[in-house]
Structure formats: structure tokens, C-alpha cells
Amino acid sequence: MRLNAKTKIGLVLLAGFALFAVIGPWIAPYDPTERGGDMLQPPSAQHWFGTTHLGQDILSQVLTGTRGVLLVGFVAGVVATVLAVLVGIASGYLTGLAAEGLSAVSNVFLVIPALPLIIIVASTLPGTGDWTIALVIGLTSWAWGARVLRAQTLSLRRRDYVQAARATGEPTWRIIGFEILPNLTAVIASGFVGTVIFAVLSEITLAFIGVSDISDWNWGTILFWAQSQQALAQGAWWWFVPAGLAIALLGTALSLLNFGIDEFVSPRLRACAGTAKVRMRVGFTPVLRREGGPGE
Amino acid sequence: MSYLLRRTGFYLLTAWIAITINFLLPRLIPGDPVMSLINRAQGQLSTQAIQSLYVLFGLNKDESIFVQYGHYWAQLLHGDLGLSFAFFPTPVASVIADSLPWTLALVGITTLASFLLGTALGVYAGWRRGSWLDLVIPVTTFLSSVPYFWLGLIAIALFAGVNGIFPSSGGYEPGLVPGWDPDFLLSAVQHSLLPAVTILLSSMSGWILSMRNMMVTVAAEDYVTVAHAKGLSERRVMVSYAARNALLPSVSGFALSLGLVVGGTLLVEIVFSYPGLGFELFQAVGAKDYPLMQGIFLIITLSVLAANFVADLAYLVLDPRTRREG
């Protein structure tokens, strides 16, 4: 599989974030919760991203927070993807009441607005650490993946090679594991990346509105403090810009990765910018045109 | 009309499940959730609030869970969602009734506008693929990765505040009485412009991307080639042949997108202190006001179900295959 430019950029950005997630807490110049003498200072040589109302270093908070963000995103993504694969393939390949029921359940979860559901579930739970939040998000956001996988499985199970495998008496688990699953790899991967994006945004939102534990640093916690201390009214733009840009950059990296997967699955989406293209014109004559040429 | 019947049945089922989740959730927590809540609230709860917590969490040991479920439904059908802690002793239903119109106006108008605008842009970008319009892809990708509330914060920093043109919080000028007079309406429009544009910018990108991708796929179909060959005008082929078919996944994917848009809108309301459901939810979370949180969840879910039902009706009009009997 040749990687296109979008996928490469996405992977490089993602690798960068992963690196910071591992080494972030160690390379952070200050303790993120430690109070200092410089309160609400704009970016300077000592504090690259400025300081908070308590003199905490924002760069250290962003660096330390990376681990929590990526951890929750990936754990929730894995949980949701495993559930989506189980429910999606079972309801697509098997027949009967159980399959219909699974499909109905995933449609129900698809329609119930996820964020309010996550908020009420998370705020009813006694503890709200990173792992709890990851599990809540994972357990509530598998439905989209399940629906896409079910549709794909439904079309795969009628293909000749699957029919042939069934005719030769292969057991069901083998057909699913060796004939169907490998052909769903790209769909599963794209669903996983999509869920990670959703999980990261949900997690940051939960921290921002104060549902999750504010003693765990993540980018949403920084925004929570910025909002509750009226950073905007005091003109402290440096308090919320770095965390927001980090979220946007991580989201963009994951989306780019997903575009790469989508284009790999569906060749029609591959960009053809700059190359000659053929388009049917009046009179059914294929006309070869170049960008910006006559006839545009 | 079997399609319509099936969809109606599905939405009734979903509504029932949402209501039951709302009933079961507080009762599934191990230990004594009320005690842990009282500890978390650090003495800010009144005795009445504690009493209604015990009722809400179903810790009334004299009744079986089925009897409680029956009571729950009876209350719900009377529009009784319990008493709010944060606004004690106001009933949850009247807190929601005050904020619902704001959210409905804001979300309703922006969702419709972003769907129409985003779809139109997506149609055009997909049809003219390879032109400068491909620039919308990186821009919209970035916008869709930014959390709504963060874009709202930036908007406030740039356009509101002391020197800004727009107010940074609230739904109308303090001192005005809500009503149908021009002063109030003007003030309400002025206050909702910035949140509306924020929601529009963030939610539109999803529609643009999905529509563009579908247009690219559909544009290669034989019937589009045939339409070109028949000598139909470019515009007619784009709108009536390609776009009409490319629209179907967008309409049927409305469910997922709407849930996301509503979630994002709640956050925009929080950032702008807009007097809608999202801001109420934020206050409820801050005050550990469980009855209000659950009431808001229920109302949001039922509204999203209703909107999806409307989208299904639109699908019925767009796709003749669903109208076939049997």
C-alpha cells in the first residue's frame, strides 16, 4: 500500500503527539499544578505559553495533558471498535431474531444524542478518572461503526467466495475470521480513527464543563480553568489558544489519516488535481481538457 | 406506507429506551449514591434536595422496582420531571420550558441553514472537482476538528468584549422584558448572531465533506453520463441527476450528524452564556442538579427523535423506492 501525502502528514503529526504523550510529563519545564510568582503573564522566555492566574506554567500543563487525552482517545476507540466489530458482523452475517435485535439496538444508540448521554452517565458515576471516562465514551459510541460494518458484511456474505466457503463446509467462525474480517480491515480502521476523534472531543468537552475529575490534567481541564477564571475578559488569550490548537491539530491529523484510508477503499475519491481529465460533453464525445485551458 | 409505520415504531422504541435509561441509570449505581453525592456537594444541598434525591434514586425501599417504574411513567405523562436543586423549588419542567424556546430557535435555524448551505457548497465542490474549490477540504477538515466551544471562545475574543461589536453573553439586553416587541427582538437577534455563526461554521463542514464525496462518486455513474449525452444543461445534470441521488446518504445520515450538532450547540450556549438548554445543563452539572440534568437529556433526545422523523419524511419524498408497498 503506497501512502499518499495526506496520510503521511497525518501519521507524522500523530507520531509527534504519541511521543509527547510518553515523554511530555518528563520534559515539562515545571510541575503543572505548582504555583509560581508570575501570575497571568503573557508568553515569555521563562514561560513559553504564559502562566495562569496562579502562576502555573501553561506549556507544562499542555505537555502533561497530552498523555491523558491520547490515553482516553485510544482506549475509548479500542472499546468502541471491538463492540462495533462484534455487533456489526454478528448482525450482518447471522440471521434471525438476535441479528435483527442487535441491529435495532445499534440504530437506537445512533439516534440518542451521544454527548448529553455521556454527560448524564459520567456525572452519575461516583469516580470520573481517565479510565472511567474512556469506558463511558467507548461504551456509548460504537453504534456508528456497527452500522457501517453491518452494511459491509451484508454485501460480503453474498459474494461467491463466501458462498463457496460455506458450501465446502467451513465452520462459521472460520468464514467470519478468515473470509469476511480481512475484507473489512479498511472499514474497521477508518471507524477506529473516527471514534478516536469523537472520543478526544467528548473527553475534552467533559473536562471543559467540569464533569470529569479536574485533578487529572488534560487540554479540557486547561480550558475549564481558563473559562472559570474569565481568561477572555482579562485578555489572557494565551490561556486557551495553545490547548485549542493542540486539539485542532490532533483532530486534523486523525482526519487526514482517515481521508487516506477512505481514498484507499474508494479509488474514485483520489484527487486528480493537475492531471488531464476526461469529461463527457454534448454529443457524447470525450473531450480531453487541461486545467485552465480553453473551453473552461 | 409500511416504511412510515416501521420508522414510527422504531422512534417509539427509541423513545421508550431513552426514558427507561433515564429511569434505570440512578438505580444501577452500587453503594449509596445519595451519600456520595451529598459528600461531593460539600454541604450545599438542602434537606429537601436530599429527600428528592432519595426519591429520584429509587432508594425508597418499600416499593419494588416495577412499582417505581409505574410511578415514574405516571409522573412523566403528567409532565412532572421532579424539582430542580439548583433552582429549588422550581419544577424541572418549568426551568426547561423557559430555556427550550431559545435553544429551539438557535439550533433549529442554524441546523437548517448549515444543512442547506453545506449541502449546496458540497454539491458545487464535488461537481467542480480539481478546481480551486478543492481548497474547501483542508479548511473544513480543520474547522470540523476544532471543538465548537473553542471556536466560540475565539469569536468572543475577536468580536465581543469591551470594544467588540457583539455582546459576549446572554440572550438579550438585561432590563428588557421578553416579548414580541421590536426592541426585544432586535436585541435577541444581536445576541444570537455570534453563537449562530459559530455553530454554522463548525457544523457546515461535515455536510460539505459528505456531500462532496457523494457527488464525486455519483458523477461517475452511467446515468449522469447519459444525461450529459442527452445534451441537458450542466446545471440540470448537476442538480436533478447527480445532486438528487447524492443527497440520499446525507439525509439518511441526518441522525448521527444531528446528535453531534446538538451536542456542539449545547457547548456554544455555555461559552456564550446563552439562556438555552445547554447553559441550563452546564449549571445543572455544576450544581449536581440530577433531576434537571435528566430532564434536559430526555427533552433533547425526544427533540432529536422528532427532527429525525421529519428527515425520514423528507427521505420518503426524495427516494421513490421507499414508497413502494411491501
Image: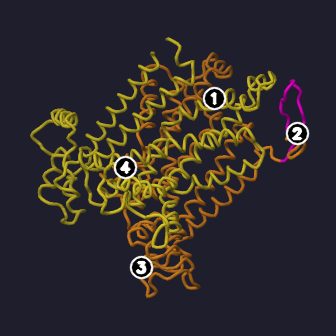
Chain colours: A orange, B yellow
| Distance from the alpha carbon under mark 1 to that under mark 3 | 54 Å
Q: What's the amino acid at mark 2?
A: Gly
Q: Which residue is mark 3?
A: A53
Where are the magenta residues, as a range? A274-288
Task: Tell me where residue A43 sits by quadrant.
Answer: bottom right
Q: Position of residue B88 (x, y in %)?
A: 18, 56
Q: Are marks 1 and 3 in contact (CB under 8 Å)?
A: no
The subunit carrying tag 2 is A
Q: Position of residue A231 (x, y in %)?
A: 44, 73
Q: Which residue is mark 4?
A: B102
Q: On the rendered structure, is B235 left or right of B209? A: right
Q: Residues within 10 Å of mark 4 (few under 14, many from 20)?
A: some
Tell us which disc is closer to us: 1 or 2. Answer: 2
Tell us which disc is closer to us: 3 or 4. Answer: 4
| Distance from the alpha carbon under mark 3 to that under mark 4 | 34 Å
Q: Residues within 10 Å of mark 2 (few under 14, many from 20)?
A: few
Instruction: Specify whether residue A196 is in view.
Output: no
Q: Which mark is residue B244?
A: 1
Tell us which disc is closer to us: 1 or 4. Answer: 4
Residues indicated by labels 4 and 2 sit on the same polypeptide chain: no
Q: What's the amino acid at mark 3?
A: His
Secondary structure, mark 4, is helix
The subunit carrying tag 3 is A
Q: Which residue is mark 2?
A: A295
Q: What's the amino acid at mark 1?
A: Arg
Tell me which residue sits at (59%, 85%) in the image.
A45
Q: Position of residue B273 (x, y in %)?
A: 38, 60
Residues indicated by labels 1 and 3 sit on the same polypeptide chain: no
B196 shown above or below B163: above
In the rendered image, the quadrant that contains the C terminus of chain A is top right
Secondary structure, mark 2, is loop
